[in-house]
Amino acid sequence: MAASSLLSSPKPCSSSSATHTSTPSHPPLPSSFRVAPAAPRFSHGLAAFAAATNPSASSRRHRAVALARPVRASMAGPARRRPEYVPNRIDDPNYVRIFDTTLRDGEQSPGATMTSAEKLVVARQLSRLGVDIIEAGFPASSPDDLDAVRSIAIEVGNTPVGEDGHVPVICGLSRCNKRDIDAAWEAVRHARRPRIHTFIATSEIHMQHKLRKTPEQVVAIAREMVAYARSLGCPDIEFSPEDAGRSNREFLYQILEEVIKAGATTLNIPDTVGYTLPYEFGKLIADIKANTPGIENAIISTHCQNDLGLATANTLAGAHAGARQLEVTINGIGERAGNASLEEVVMAIKCRRELLGGLYTGINTQHITMSSKMVQEHSGLHVQPHKAIVGANAFAHESGIHQDGMLKYKGTYEIISPDDIGLTRANEFGIVLGKLSGRHAVRSKLVELGYEITDKEFEDFFKRYKEVAEKKKRVTDEDIEALLSDEIFQP
């Protein structure tokens, strides 16, 4: 292979994924690095590896070695500074606002209802995470939801967080009617940066069968209600043409032009039923940007459902085409098959920003793991083990070939460092022992646990290990120690 092609080969997303500090593409270890002994294991696998186990019999010729390992470097926060918030413009064209709707659309997942107290706890975490806008609920849906959104607006909507003193926008959803808009305004008006998000369907199937209104009537309602929301004193109005993915393009341009004139600051384009393919959705955003009069006076947003498993891909296609607000949820929870996943969208932008025109977000990615676990706890919806970014297996390696590569250089099989999402693995390399594990990984586990044995002893041990591993889904530390006791330490 030519040297030039080697120089252009892909690299891990984060410098912290490096294991060799001498590699030019990775910075040297900071002076704050310290050497720490192995730490105790905690119940959820979020701590350092197990404490070294010392065979107590002094007569044994085998000794346990407690190996010290360096604390790994990780990204401290957003790589670039968040632009000052202005409702209808972003001064840096590469900055993408993250609109989190976990507490509204996410809560629409069957069985995911949260109490007001739980929603407030999650909202605090979303603020720490660095989301730009928190859609806190649908105030007109119930008195309890109105109270929850109001509480979030009062506390989270007025409390600076992070080094930049960021205060998120607090948003409430409403249909295009005065009752809903009044409730939304009553709930969010206490925030430093309040927003009303109002919507009406624009696809032919929705207008005919659900609304039973003509396109002309829908345009008139949208225009009137956006103007009404502005008249209440709310400076930040988001408008969504529901089912935009199946709506007539010319009609979309028309209704969006009218709501901009009426005072809308953000135009959210929902793929409500997850129907579009990425190239279609990207073209939809590009066409809206090119053909809607007055579009320069508003922010284009995306809201992609996951019915065909394309929510994240469609969201990224929309961002590439010019959308500068992306609507997402933690763990991708939401109505039916869910929404675009915040952690997937944000980490994709971080990892592949060079192919997305240099886009970046204000998310502090080190809060991703905690945010995911908190939403799982309060919603009762637990992610599948193979879920991207936050699944239990996302940074785990069982294949012997993969384990060997990880032990040599982590960038061989990981494009993201666990440190960058706030995850501390049970062991440094994410190795999970099973029947597919090879000698290198098993020997590494013995060293991690603090055991030194001879090559011959290891071969005897490895043979027995394989026999046990064939019968178990996973081989635990306790299994390893029991095998050592049976095969090596018996007189």
Image (cartoon, rainbow, N blue to C red):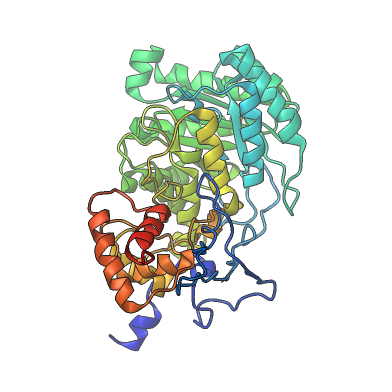
Q: Is residue 489 above or below residue 25?
A: above
Q: Nearer the viewer, residue 362 or 269?
A: 362
Which image quadrant: the N terminus? bottom left
Q: Is residue 451 above or below residue 369?
A: below
Image coordinates for residue 181, horizontal then vertical, percent: 62, 19
Which image quadrant: the C terminus? bottom left
In the rendered image, is residue 181 in sight?
Answer: no
Image coordinates for residue 42, horizontal then vertical, percent: 55, 48
Q: Is residue 185 above or below residue 278?
A: above
In the rendered image, is residue 399 in sight?
Answer: yes
Q: Residue visible at 45% across and 42% down?
A: 341
Q: Residue visible at 69% across and 46% down?
A: 85
Quarter location, residue 269:
top left
Q: Is residue 253 left or right of residue 465?
A: right
Q: Nearer the viewer, residue 173 or 329?
A: 329
Q: Nearer the viewer, residue 240 or 385?
A: 385
Image coordinates for residue 119, horizontal then vertical, percent: 61, 28
Give the residue at the far bottom of this rendering. Answer: 3
Q: Is residue 76 left or right of residue 99?
A: right
Q: Residue visible at 65% across and 24% down?
A: 117
State the count of labels. Answer: 0
Image coordinates for residue 393, horizontal then vertical, percent: 39, 50
Q: Is residue 439 left or right of residue 364?
A: left
Q: Nearer the viewer, residue 479 or 355?
A: 479
